[in-house]
Image: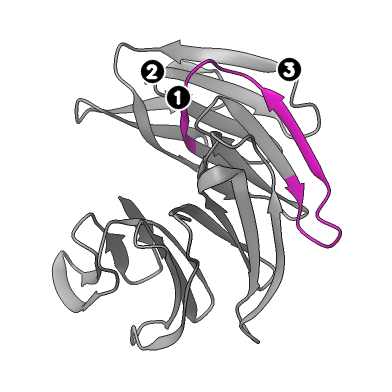
Amino acid sequence: RKVICTDSNVISASNDGMINIWKDLKKIRSVRAHSWWVTDFDLSNNKLVSVSLDETVKVWSYPELKLLFSHKLYGSNKHYSVTINNGKAFIGSTHGLMSVLDISSFEWLESTTIAGYYGIPISAAKSDKYVFFGSSDGFIIKVMASAPYKIFKEKISNFALRAIAQEQGILYVGDDDGVLRKVSIDNLKKSYILNHSSNAIRALTVDNDSIYAGYDNGNIRIFSRTTVSEN
C-alpha cells in the first residue's frame, strides 16, 4: 500500500496489516500494526503515523516501531490517507472527514468535513503551508496547515484521485482513468494532462526531474518533469 525510503532504510505497509522496515532488501523489523489494511502512513523525524480500514489511527516510534498512541474512531470511519505537516497528522476518512492530530501531545485539534459524504480523501500530499487531498469523487482539496484550516477545492476529474505528489509548487495527480495531471497549488483550476493510460494510476513520487508513476497493471513509467515527456 505504501513505501517510504529514508536515508538508510525502506519502510513498507500492506493489506495484511503489517509495517516492515527493510535494509539492503532484508527485513530488519516488523509489526502487525492493524487488524485490517494499512491504507497509508507517513514519517516525520522519529514518529510514524499509520491509518487503516480498521478505523484506528496509530503513532509509532521509529525505527523501534513501539506503539505510542492508538485511537479508534467509531461509526464506520475508515481511514484512507495521512500526511504529517509541522508536527500534525492530517487524516482523511470516510464521509469526507479530515481529522488533525498533534503527534507530540496526542491531542485531537480538528475534525471537519472537507468533501462530500461520498467523497473520501483517499490520497494526500503536503507543502510548507498546505496539505492536499485527492478525493474519490475527483476533487483536489487544499487545506491550510495551520488553524483555522481554511479549505479550497476544485474538481479536476470524474474519477477517483488515487495518487498525489507535490514538488516545487506543482501537484502531480493520477486517477482511476489512468490520467496524470499537473496542477498548480496556487490555482487549482488550471490543470495540464501529461499522459493517459488505460490503467489506473495507484502511486506517484517525484524525485529531482523525474516523475515515477505506478499503474494497476504493475508497470512503472518514468516521465521527465521539466519537458513533460515520457522517458
State how the image is colored. Answer: one colour
Report which residue position mark 2 lands on. Answer: 178
Identify the image quadrant of residue 88.
bottom right
Of mark 3 and mark 2, the one earlier in the sequence is 2
Residue located 53% across and 29% down the image: 173
Write down the region rendered in magenta: 143-163
The spot of residue 160 in percent (x, y) is 47, 27
Amino acid under disc 1: Asp
Which amino acid type corresponds to the residue marked 3 in the rendered image?
Lys
Membership of 150 in magenta stretch: yes
Is residue 202 positioned above or below 80 on the image? above
Residue 107 on image: x %, y %: 67, 81
Sequence-wise, the earlier of marks 1 and 3 is: 1
Residue 31 versus residue 160 in the image, above or below: below
Viewer can see residue 224: no
Q: Please, what secondary structure does the residue beneath circle 2 have?
A: loop
Give the CA distance from mark 1 to mark 3: 16 Å
Q: Which residue is mark 3?
A: 190
Label 2–label 1 contact, CB within 8 A: yes
Q: Nearer the viewer, residue 119 or 164?
A: 119
Instruction: Locate the C terminus and report the quarter of the image it occupies.
Output: top left
Camera sees residue 139: yes
Q: Nearer the viewer, residue 117 or 216?
A: 117
The amino acid marked with disc number 2 is Gly
- Badge 3 local density, few (<14 within 10 Å), some, or many (20+)? few
